[in-house]
Amino acid sequence: MPLDLDARKPLKLCVLKFGSSVLQKPDDYARAAHEIYRHTRNGEKVVAVVSALEGETDSLFAVGGDVGEGCSDALLARLVRCGELKSAALMGLALQRSGVPSAVLDPHEMDLQAEGEALDANLTGLDADRVLAHFESADVIVAPGFFGEGVEGPVTLGRGGTDLTAVEFSHWLGADRVRLIKDVDGVYTDDPAKNPEAVRLDQLDYDEAAKVSRGLVQEKAIFRAKQNNVVIEVAALGSPFATRIAAVEKQAGPVETPKRLRVAVLGHGAVGAGVCSHLLAHPGRFELGPVLVRDPDQHAANAPELRFTSDPAEALEGNPDIVVEAMGGTDIARSLSQTVLREGHHLVSANKAVVALDLERLHDLARQHGRELKYSAAVGGGVPVLELIDLLGAQGSILSVEGVMNGTCNFIFGQMQKGVRLAEAVSEAQRLGFAEADPSTDLDGLDAADKLSIIIRHAFGVTLAPDQIACESLNDLSAQRIKAVQEQGLVFKQVARCEVTADGRVEARVDIEALPPEHPFAGLVNEGNGFLIRMPQRTVSVQGKGAGRWPTAEAVFADIMDIQRAYLSGDLHASPLQETPLSRIPRMSSGQVA
């Protein structure tokens, strides 16, 4: 991760606050995880400050009053903080499922200090170095809001206290902004639910915000933001718009015009099923058509809430806005991908084989027909390596990219490290679903070559077909070599590498390498993927879950949401973070500067 090693501050840091207006039930943590992933894949490290689920704090106050009638405020504070502790753990679980590297920290683990009345205290400080150190291995830190550690135990911060926590974190950690996620898309001149003439504001100053946002943003939080010149943004989940509270002139802005997009999903395997689940969880944003599968009856028995078809024409009827290709393979998927763009649909693909073979053709079709082509999940699963390469490439020259890109091989090598023989490790990978019945594409390096071909196009702007990339197969490993590596305490990894030579050529290959335990790739386990991107002055690393239903579906859904936000903003080519000029600050990742 490119850190300022003196200050230990990431180059780009955002504090996101999720209140009880958006955390109303356990399913909402997945929606919050989408929002967090959106920020991390666009180059930000995130501190996510969470409130308790809606109604939970009131419930804890009520039960505390019943059980301990006339009890001290100090004991009530100790009780009601439990809602935030539970919420932070649930957010951490949602992020873990999505494959986002994260750490959940309680106030005492951050030395988050407070003073004042037990039920209406103020925060006074935290150990910033201790907090920021976690960004060396995580992209997100999750923290409970609403309370801190007083001299005599936990104290709470009063109603809306999570807003105050988020603002103070932004100040003490040197964040670029704090974004308060609410159930409205910004601050209005009046309550839009009561006054249809209310105007949404793009920006306003702190004093005006304290007047018009009463009940929306805690007044203490606005006061502290003004004292420390902290920029506050107020926005809804997934919104392209935000109201900016800062030392600025008041300015009105546009209101979201909801557009429910029609989505066709091709394929209902692990990834396709995960994408369908995300789409069904957002009925106000998306309408899901019949899902294309080989055997509709079989899938209908397992997912009765969906409609299935084996007819591509039926899956694409109704003129869908977005088509998601999650079938895999290169037969029908290859022709359908081109047809989709040619007929004027946006295409989101998780199919690295098709993207690698036809990347230039698909880009040409997208340009010709004014459509979006997105394929973040095709490389790295939920690891946003293509976005990282694009962001770094805009800052300077990329010299090389190398990575562990295949979860199947990574699992097999992990088994071998435990003393399991290669053939048995392959069988275990097949049993657990990491490997196909015919694992040759993974073992022979062809899957990694597909991904490397796509990376080369993004890193160097040239086309190198997968069949032009030399690959070493796991099947070529001799027993003697395996034994020698184990005796030396080294770790086998399948490493795909591309680099620019001194004469300007791009060379690429997939090798089986024996790495020392301290190498950044050595600790990757199971479906873990990791990448090193070398530039003239630094090396940036990123890692996470490179396969699996939920991490890969998270990347696909992020592509879908990018398109949906572009519709809302009126610009299909808009950046998902156009509401802030900070989106041009350099990208961070979850490794260290070499």
Image: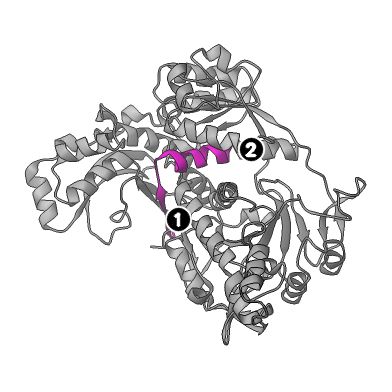
Relative to 303, say whether 45 is above or below: below
Pinpoint residue 385: horizontal percent, then vertical percent.
46, 46
Question: In this orientation, does residue 473 appear?
Answer: no
Q: Residue at x 73, y 33 (%)?
A: 259
User: Which amino acid, mark 1?
Assistant: Pro
Q: As rendered, which of 586 and 132 lies closer to the eye?
A: 132
The answer to whether residue 6 is left or right of residue 215 is left
Would residue 236 be counted in the magenta stretch?
Answer: no
Q: As rendered, which of 520 and 462 lies closer to the eye?
A: 520
Q: Nearer the viewer, mark 1 or mark 2?
A: 2
Would residue 545 be counted in the magenta stretch?
Answer: yes
The magenta region covers 537-559
Relative to 78, say whether 160 is above or below: above
User: Which amino acid, mark 2?
Assistant: His
The answer to whether residue 438 is left or right of residue 449 is left
The answer to whether residue 495 is left or right of residue 590 is left
Element on which disc 2 rests: loop
Element on which disc 1 rests: loop
Q: Residue at x 72, y 65 (%)?
A: 231
Pinpoint residue 467: horizontal percent, then vertical percent.
32, 27
User: Which residue bears the numbered disc 1?
Assistant: 101
Pinpoint residue 403: horizontal percent, then vertical percent.
35, 47
* Number of numbered discs overlaid on the protein picture: 2
Q: Residue at x 33, y 57 (%)?
A: 520
Q: As rendered, which of 83 and 90 lies closer to the eye?
A: 83
Q: Which mark is drawn over residue 282?
A: 2
Pinpoint residue 51: horizontal percent, then vertical percent.
63, 62
Give the distance between the C-alpha atoms of the residues marked 1 and 2, in whole angstroms. Answer: 25 Å
Q: Earlier in the sequence, mark 1 or mark 2?
A: 1
Callout 1 touching callout 2 (CB < 8 Å): no
Name which quarter of the figure residue 289 lies in.
Answer: top right
